Amino acid sequence: MFKPVTIKDIAKALNLSTSTVSRALRGGYEISEETKKIVLDYAEKINFTRNPIALSLKERRSYSIGIIVCEVANVFFSQAIDGIESIAYNKGYHVVISQSHDQYEREVTNIQHLANRSVDGIIISLAAETKDYSHIEKLHAQGLPIVFFDRILESMNTHKVTSNNTQGAFDATEYLISKGVKKIAHLANAKQLSITEQRKIGYLKALEKHDIPFDENYVKYCEHGGSKKGEVDTAIKELLDLQVKPDAIFVASDRLSIGCLEALKKYNPKNDVLIAGFSNSDVVNLLKPSLSYVRQPAFEMGRIATEMLINLIESKYPVEEFETKILDTTFHINE
Amino acid sequence: MFKPVTIKDIAKALNLSTSTVSRALRGGYEISEETKKIVLDYAEKINFTRNPIALSLKERRSYSIGIIVCEVANVFFSQAIDGIESIAYNKGYHVVISQSHDQYEREVTNIQHLANRSVDGIIISLAAETKDYSHIEKLHAQGLPIVFFDRILESMNTHKVTSNNTQGAFDATEYLISKGVKKIAHLANAKQLSITEQRKIGYLKALEKHDIPFDENYVKYCEHGGSKKGEVDTAIKELLDLQVKPDAIFVASDRLSIGCLEALKKYNPKNDVLIAGFSNSDVVNLLKPSLSYVRQPAFEMGRIATEMLINLIESKYPVEEFETKILDTTFHINE
DNA sequence: ATGAAAGCGCTAACAA
DNA sequence: TTGTTAGCGCTTTCAT
């Protein structure tokens, strides 16, 4: 079986005590340069690495961070994960990814799983279904460092990273207006998500600025973030069946965009509905009903969230001051 | 700080020894139902969970498995990861994901990182750049369970999971032929990858079957799997600049497909080149230069690889018999 | 500068 | 049935 070398082996081979070996391997104080070199050379030679599990037990931390997103098969999140990894690995942390699939139950299970002393902190973007936050609040109260990104929990006092959802939504909606449409629907995510509210505000602001009356019937929420079969399909169908059919749709997320385009292809072959929405997809320029889009700096959001988290983890003193970083989105036109 | 309860705390509170508590918590033998109930109830009440790190140290395993893919921002891999997770979590394993970004260096670093006693086994799909396999062979020789999927290492004696790449490539190429084209180029992945060879065989078989002569100039390899800026772009440009321009392209991967379509949009506005290729994208039906595609059962591949790995990990005896599972692909037409 | 020994949380002989 | 103890690999006082 897989039986790695331990410092004990090194100690024996070199006729030293384990503590000497340990000291040589880590710090540098209280040890002669000479012995240190001998140990390091030998360790190098036999390709020794300290057992991180023993280290974790000793230091009471695992040098790993947990991340919870709805799914990795979503470009926004996989880009964010890239950003998270880029920092984490450099600072010696493992990244444990888990997916809520936008389900409350799985979010609870996963966060519990991660928290049981096996991660030093958590970066989370809430599941669409989550309405009760006690599972997170409890862990936070116990001192587990938590950073929110994207879908944040406003009420919790910790670091947060989002993009400027309101501005992004405003840009997209105003772009649609600039194309001459007036009946602009909004395909939104689950109602209770922070991003849903923020994006709706941007949408409303743009309507207001251009004196377009708001019609509540034009807003469709997807309580499962579009992850439930037929959810988006139904929403789009309902929009198209309205007495006064919308001539444009502002879509709140990547996932919803895909469902939206598919549904439109099916139910609106005339292709006379303009679309703009949030998307980080790399194929967005190749899509057929073309889609102008708001892009979030996902990689950067991941980076920042991770820096914040590692700061929390490594802070000697309890952190009292928290910040919320809001990064700019960019808008891209596809005619 | 985050200070969880230990069995010692429970023992003290209940006036028992730690071993009794331990026994109550885990198995069931050698302990009276009565005491057991007391302990379990109390543990339940204070929401106790065993420290997995201490457990790992003791049992010399971490109940986590490492997975190495080129990138998670790739639908094939994120679907495979979903499959991996679905099994792993059910069996009580954590999943640690790391990305090689198709770079040899990163593959070596990551696998080393994972192997240092912090994962019990590894599921890997090789990086496009990897030509030397000693980093993997060494760990395997030391007894670390390894399962390959997708981009496998033929020469290593262990479990492997792939899709039927040859058949998939054959289907795609034959489809193109059925559309009346004869000058079919092939945009391929890095030359040394198993999938590259297998897919090329399928491509050649289809050509042969229909008496179409093979022209080596029609095959372009992307040594970095398309992850290097401009790699695909250049390849497509070269194909289009050939004296006898191809009238169709069989593309070997999702990543390459995207680059291919983008390049074609740029260099071939006439849009007179037919495309078919491997893709697991969920938006493939919405792409503009339309793309008929071979789909791999990514989720299933992930599931199977994980089952194989966990079997290896949990096997009481050294496993000598290994199997290679080849799953069927499906072909989908987009006119 | 080095070694001996205790301890991180848990399990498993071995004793009682 | 329960308790005592040693030990997983490592770090860290405290002696020497």
Image (tube, coloured by chain):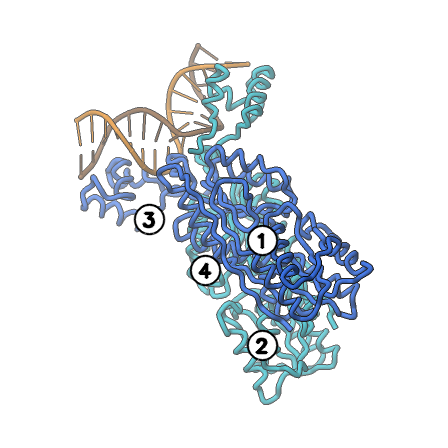
Chain colours: A cyan, B blue, C orange, D brown
The residue where tag 4 is placed is A133
Residues under labels 2 and 3: Cα distance? 49 Å
- Whether pointer 1 and pointer 4 mark residues with C-beta atoms closer than 8 Å, the reply is no
Q: Residues within 10 Å of mark 4 (few under 14, many from 20)?
A: some
The residue where tag 2 is placed is A263
From where the camera sits, is residue B120 visible? yes
Which type of secondary structure does the marked residue at label 2 adopt?
Answer: helix
Q: Residue B100 location in percent, x, y? A: 61, 45
Q: Residues within 10 Å of mark 1 (few under 14, many from 20)?
A: many
**Image mark 4: chain:** A
Q: Earlier in the sequence, mark 1 or mark 3?
A: 3
Q: Are marks 4 and 2 on the same chain?
A: yes
Left of C10 or right of it: where is A238?
Answer: right
- Three-letter code for the amino acid on which mark 1 is drawn: Val
Which type of secondary structure does the marked residue at label 4 adopt?
Answer: loop
Work out whether A123 lies above or below A290. Answer: above
- Whether pointer 3 and pointer 4 mark residues with C-beta atoms closer than 8 Å, the reply is no
